[in-house]
Image (cartoon, grey):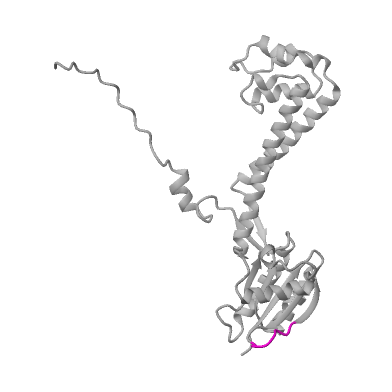
């Protein structure tokens, strides 16, 4: 009984697809076709794979271009392949091969040869295959990575703001513990709006700030001759920080709704996310409670 497999060499605008029966004892006879990477062409590709009775598909992880191909095959081809009569255990399986494991000899790299090499090395178990989670977990992964990137953007903008103030001889960061605190924000906003009086800027600080008004006046003394370009850059950086912080708050909000493929997935917090039980048991709950060290006892005399 024939067992057909397909190999796809993924590019940005087109796909090189080959199909062959891997149960034959002779050389594989590949059928080659070109397809586009737009949604309509991906549906046509799925239909052709169903007509060819392809059991498994392997593709190369080329940048981010493999993701729409994987999603379309997962949606149109995989379900039909697994539901047809006589489907086997591996029917409808998608494989994502790491590009380095499908590397060919120099001077022998062509699109269809790469696709054929994918099939041959998958059969001989020479490919390094990556794990791809299901669609819902991929969506959560994208959401988590985006939130992490926004946090990095906030740190980057904070460092950029501190470097800008140092270049402008505004030594505010040496007197406040948090450059994005309430007192520092009020002073920086007034500085960006054009305030030139160091005493007026120092008066915006909170009374609980450890720095004295005289120290703040000295640190902000350069504002009297500050170039308008620095004020504009400080204002732009503060606005960027506010925008990033707003996005971070939206990510952390429990009202976040993520819509995918016509279904609504509600953010359920930690309780229903993958691995939540392990996180609550090992990270969110204290691993150890510091015991109070006993008070030292006076040493007794050796003579009793």
Quadrant of the image containing the C terminus: top left
Specify the quadrant of the image occupied by residue 149: top right
Q: How many numbered marks are there?
A: 0
Specify the quadrant of the image occupied by residue 291: top left
Q: Read off the magenta span.
A: 24-30
x and y, in percent, of residue 257 in the image: 64, 53
x and y, in percent, of residue 77 in the image: 68, 76
x and y, in percent, of residue 252 in the image: 60, 44
As drawn, 183 above or below 289 = above
x and y, in percent, of residue 202 in the image: 70, 14
Q: Nearer the viewer, residue 204 or 12?
A: 12
Q: Is residue 210 left or right of residue 189?
A: left
Q: Nearer the viewer, residue 254 or 142?
A: 142
- Most extreme residue toward the right, as rendered? 228
Which residue is found at the position 59% from the left and 59% from the top?
Answer: 137
- Most extreme residue toward the left, as rendered? 304
Q: Is residue 298 left or right of residue 213?
A: left
Quadrant of the image containing the N terminus: bottom right
Which residue is found at the position 25% from the left and 20% from the top?
Answer: 297
As drawn, 282 above or below 170 = below
Q: Nearer the viewer, residue 153 or 277?
A: 153
- Most extreme residue toward the top, as rendered? 214
As drawn, 148 above or below 236 = below
Q: Would residue 160 be counted in the magenta stretch? A: no
Q: Main SS of the magenta segment? A: loop
Which residue is found at the position 64% from the left and 50% from the top?
Answer: 145
As drawn, 221 above or below 78 = above
Specify the quadrant of the image occupied by residue 81: bottom right
- Most extreme residue toward the bottom, as rendered? 1
Q: Is residue 131 left or right of residue 280?
A: right
């Amino acid at each position: 009984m024939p067992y057909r497999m397909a190999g796809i060499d993924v590019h940005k605008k087109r796909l090189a697809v080959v199909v062959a029966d891997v149960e034959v004892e002779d050389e594989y006879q590949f059928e080659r076709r070109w397809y586009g990477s737009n949604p309509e062409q991906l549906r046509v590709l799925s239909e052709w794979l169903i007509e060819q009775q392809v059991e498994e598909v392997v593709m190369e992880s080329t940048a981010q271009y493999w993701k729409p191909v994987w999603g379309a095959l997962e949606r149109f081809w995989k379900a039909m392949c697994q539901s047809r009569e006589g489907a086997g255990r591996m029917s409808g399986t998608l494989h994502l091969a790491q590009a380095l494991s499908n590397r060919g000899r120099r001077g022998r790299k062509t699109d269809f040869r790469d696709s054929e090499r994918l099939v041959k090395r998958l059969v001989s178990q020479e490919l390094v295959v990556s794990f791809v989670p299901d669609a819902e977990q991929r969506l959560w992964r994208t959401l988590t990575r985006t939130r992490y990137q926004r946090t990095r953007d906030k740190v980057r903008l904070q460092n950029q703001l501190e470097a800008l103030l140092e270049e402008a001889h505004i030594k505010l960061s040496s007197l406040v513990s948090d450059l994005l605190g309430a007192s520092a924000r009020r002073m920086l906003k007034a500085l960006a709006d054009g305030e030139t009086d160091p005493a007026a800027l120092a008066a915006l600080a909170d009374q609980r700030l450890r720095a004295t008004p005289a120290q703040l006046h000295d640190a902000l003394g350069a504002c009297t001759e500050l170039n308008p370009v620095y004020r504009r850059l400080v204002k732009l950086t503060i606005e960027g920080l506010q925008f990033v912080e707003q996005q971070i708050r939206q990510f952390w909000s429990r009202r976040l709704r993520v819509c995918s493929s016509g279904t609504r997935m509600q953010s359920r917090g930690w309780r229903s996310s993958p691995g939540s039980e392990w996180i609550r048991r090992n990270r969110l709950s204290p691993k150890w409670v510091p015991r109070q060290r006993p008070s030292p006892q006076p040493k007794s005399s050796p003579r009793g």
